[in-house]
Image (spheres, rainbow, N blue to C red):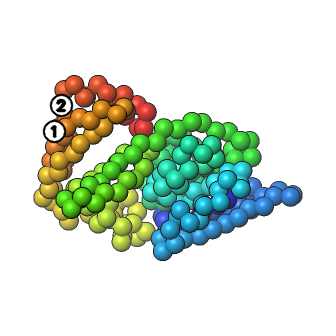
Amino acid sequence: LVLNNLASGYGEGAIYDFVRSFAADGDEVCLRSTDGTTELESLIADARDFDAVIASGGDGTVTATAYSLAGTGIPVMPFPAGTANLLALNLAAPNEPHALAKMLRAGITLDFDMAEIEFRADDGDSAKKGFGIMAGAGYDATIMKGAQPSKRLLGPMAYFSAALANPLPPTSKITLTLDGETVDEFVDSGSDVVTPDNAQERLDTLKGYIG
């Protein structure tokens, strides 16, 4: 099952080269596309009927797919078709379609830890998101949102442009839960996060798992 985010990256269509390279006699390759209008979850509702799921897009597409399928045992391949593709870079995965097709055919997999962030509004509403490398809120999220319209034109430079357009970062309060234990008094000043001393060692360990 191939999930193709049409809005990711530069729209060069490398995923179609991947499909052509992978397909062999007797294979069925199902390609489903979204430009962000169709919810990703609806496209992978029957993922158990497939041998593997290929998430073609940026880090958001890959992470959302992996988070939705976490714990199911269904292999998920990140296909780097976004602007930065940090997850694929951290996994040292190839970025050439034929090499990725060969890796998929060989069935090479690894177990990968997912983390979860919960956003809570003042009115009590909350939402959960999964992430594989990093998660951001406040100023970081503002930069990501601001870069969205110009990513296809500017590439990674869109993030710098968005940062320059937001020179005064807000301050946010963050609560972090590690291994079921809640650590309070996290202050995000926009450029860094101040953490209690007793949490730093555990944070470094967490970075080792997800970074």
> How many residues crowd mark 1 within 10 Å: few (<14), some (14–19), many (20+)?
few
In-front residue for pair 117/32: 117
Which quadrant of the figure has residue 23?
bottom right
Q: Nearer the viewer, residue 128 or 36?
A: 128
Between residue 203 and residue 126, name the one nearer to us.
Answer: 126
Q: Disc 2 residue type?
A: Pro
Residue matched to label 2: 196
Q: Quadrant of residue 174?
A: top left
Callout 2 secondary element: loop
Please give the residue where the numbered disc 1 appears in the rendered image: 185
- Confirm whether residue 32 shows in the render: yes
**Residue at image x 56%, y 50%?**
69
Give the image location of residue 205, x and y in percent: 36, 28
Q: Residue at x 49, y 50 (%)?
A: 67
Residue at figure coordinates x 71%, y 64% from the top left: 30
* Amino acid, disc 1: Glu
Measured from the top left, where is residue 74 in percent x and y?
Answer: 64, 47
At a point 67% along the width and 66% down the height, the residue shown is: 31
Which quadrant is home to the N terminus? bottom right
Provide residue 157's location: percent of width, then percent of height. Answer: 34, 60
